Image (tube, rainbow, N blue to C red):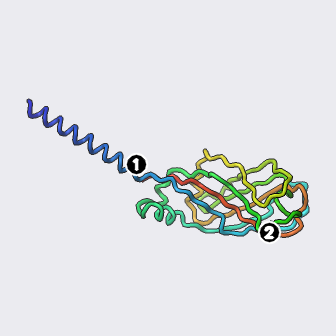
């Protein structure tokens, strides 16, 4: 009887040690990876004088192999199928050739949208009221609680900038949209 008690005690200690070891391994295979997409493409905002309605004023595309990104940042252990969540943490639009006449002050409101081959429903980031002050950098408010995982499953990304103009854009503006995500990967 004493032999069985000692054996049971040893087995219990071994199981506990093994479970703790497995927990440590799983914690080591958890990553929050910063990902920026969209910043490779220059999007041209064409001259327009329509200040009556909101409309798309520029668009662009780029490709990003998300599986390669995850593998490169997890020592080739995890891939795109290990993505647990993707949260948008920032959306910034830059004008590269702005002037005092043509800049973000021309926009009364603005939105950017993106979709991918993984999810073709456009996701919008909206700035409902843009100040009438000179700026060549525009930070749009984001909701970092929305899981955008389905968009990251694709490798081709498509972008739009839409706006309701406060005053006409009289010259073509070269812009970049930069989306920053936190990609949570679990193995």
Residue 127 in the figure: left or right of residue 38: right
Q: CA distance from mark 1 to mark 2?
A: 46 Å
Mark nearest the camera among 1 and 2 is: 2
Query: Which image quadrant for residue 113?
Result: bottom right
Task: Give whichever of 124, 143 is nearer the camera.
Answer: 143
Mark before the other along the chain sequence, 1 or 2: 1
**Who's the residue at 47% across and 53% down the image?**
31
What element does badge 2 sit on? loop
Residue 172 to residue 91: above or below:
below
Q: Which mark is residue 3?
A: none
Residue at 71% x, 65% y is 176
Residue designated by label 1: 27
Quadrant including the N terminus: top left
Asked which secondary structure carries label 1, the reply is helix
| 5 left or right, relative to 60 | left
Q: Could you say where residue 34 lies in the image, as x and y percent from the top left? A: 56, 57
183 to 96, vertically: above or below:
above
Res 99 → quadrant? bottom right
Residue 173, located in which quarter of the rendered image? bottom right
Taking depth in this image into account, of 82 and 93 the one nearest to the observer is: 93
Residue 35 or residue 187, whichever sits in front: 35
Answer with left or right where residue 71 lies relative to residue 51: left
| Horizontal and vertical percent position of residue 36 | 61, 61
Q: Which mark is residue 97?
A: 2
Q: Residues within 10 Å of mark 1 (few under 14, many from 20)?
A: few
């Amino acid at each position: 009887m004493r032999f069985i008690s000692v054996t049971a005690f040893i087995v219990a200690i071994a199981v506990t040690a093994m479970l703790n070891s497995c927990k440590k391994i799983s914690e080591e295979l958890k990553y929050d990876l910063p990902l920026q997409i969209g910043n490779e493409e220059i999007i041209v905002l064409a001259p327009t004088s329509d200040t009556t309605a909101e409309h798309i004023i520029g668009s662009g595309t780029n490709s990003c192999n998300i599986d390669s990104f995850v593998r490169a940042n997890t020592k080739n252990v995890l891939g795109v199928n290990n993505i647990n969540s993707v949260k948008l943490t920032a959306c910034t639009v830059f004008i590269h050739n702005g002037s005092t006449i043509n800049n973000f002050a021309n926009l009364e409101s603005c939105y950017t949208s993106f979709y991918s081959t993984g999810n073709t429903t456009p996701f919008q980031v909206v700035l409902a009221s843009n100040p009438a002050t000179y700026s060549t950098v525009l930070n749009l408010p984001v909701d970092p609680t929305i899981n955008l995982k389905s968009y990251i499953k694709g490798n081709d990304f498509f972008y739009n900038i839409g706006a309701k103009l406060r005053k006409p854009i009289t010259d073509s503006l070269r812009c970049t949209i930069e989306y920053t995500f936190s990609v949570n990967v679990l193995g």
